[in-house]
Amino acid sequence: MPRSPSSESPCPCGGIPAGAAFAACCEPALSGRAWPATAEALMRSRYTAFAVGDGDHLFRTWHPRTRPRDTAPEPGVEFTGLIIDEVVGGGVDDAEGIVAFTAHSRAGGRAGAMRERSRFVRRAGRWMYLDGAAG
């Protein structure tokens, strides 16, 4: 079951704009009330879904062609910060986009970081995560 932060607390993704509350940033996407308008906003909502354990949002936003059977976040991983390294395309009028990011985490008392260059595409007018490569 997802463990969402309070609506007033800072969004786990860092916020759009920076420091935005969960209610003004990723909560509408995770609750299904709104779909992210850009590839970066979708990527941030997916990071937040990992952070709060919302596998349903990950399933809904993963392109069916590349989606694995199990989209549940790995238990025991605490996501501690997100840095957007690069955004290419992915705007409201684009069909494709790339978001490179670094996700910081802690598991078993050890800090870690994952770097990925994610590809996003529009499907039926909505941004979807297609795939990503480490780096």
Image: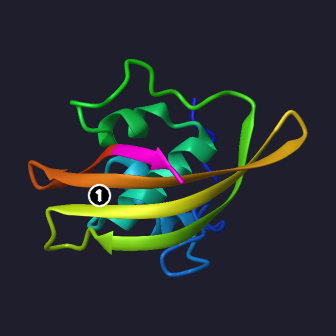
Q: Give the residue type that dot 1 points to.
A: Ala
- Residue shown at 28% from the left, 31% from the top: 66
Residue 65 to residue 98: above or below: above
Residue at the outermost front position: 135
Q: Which residue is mark 1?
A: 34
Q: Secondary structure at mark 1?
A: loop
Left or right, 65 with reference to 60: left
Whether residue 82 appears in magenta in the rendering, the answer is no
Q: Quadrant of residue 9?
A: bottom right
Residue at the outermost top position: 69
Q: Is residue 26 visible?
A: no
- Residue shown at 35% from the left, 43% from the top: 131
Left or right, 57 with reference to 95: right
Q: Residues within 10 Å of mark 1 (few under 14, many from 20)?
A: few
Q: Main secondary structure of the magenta part?
A: strand
Residue 92 to residue 45: above or below: below
Q: Which corner quadrant holds the N terminus? A: top right
Residue at the outermost left position: 124
Residue at the outermost bottom position: 17
Q: Position of residue 122 (x, y in %)?
A: 16, 54
Left or right, 96 with reference to 84: left
Front residue of this view, candidates 56 and 6: 56
Residue 108 to residue 5: above or below: above
Residue 87 to residue 6: above or below: below
- Residue shown at 51% from the left, 45% from the top: 49
* Numbered range of the magenta stretch: 131-135
Whether residue 132 appears in magenta in the rendering, the answer is yes
Q: Position of residue 46 (x, y in %)?
A: 46, 49
Q: Quadrant of residue 64?
A: top left
- Residue shown at 39% from the left, 65% from the top: 41
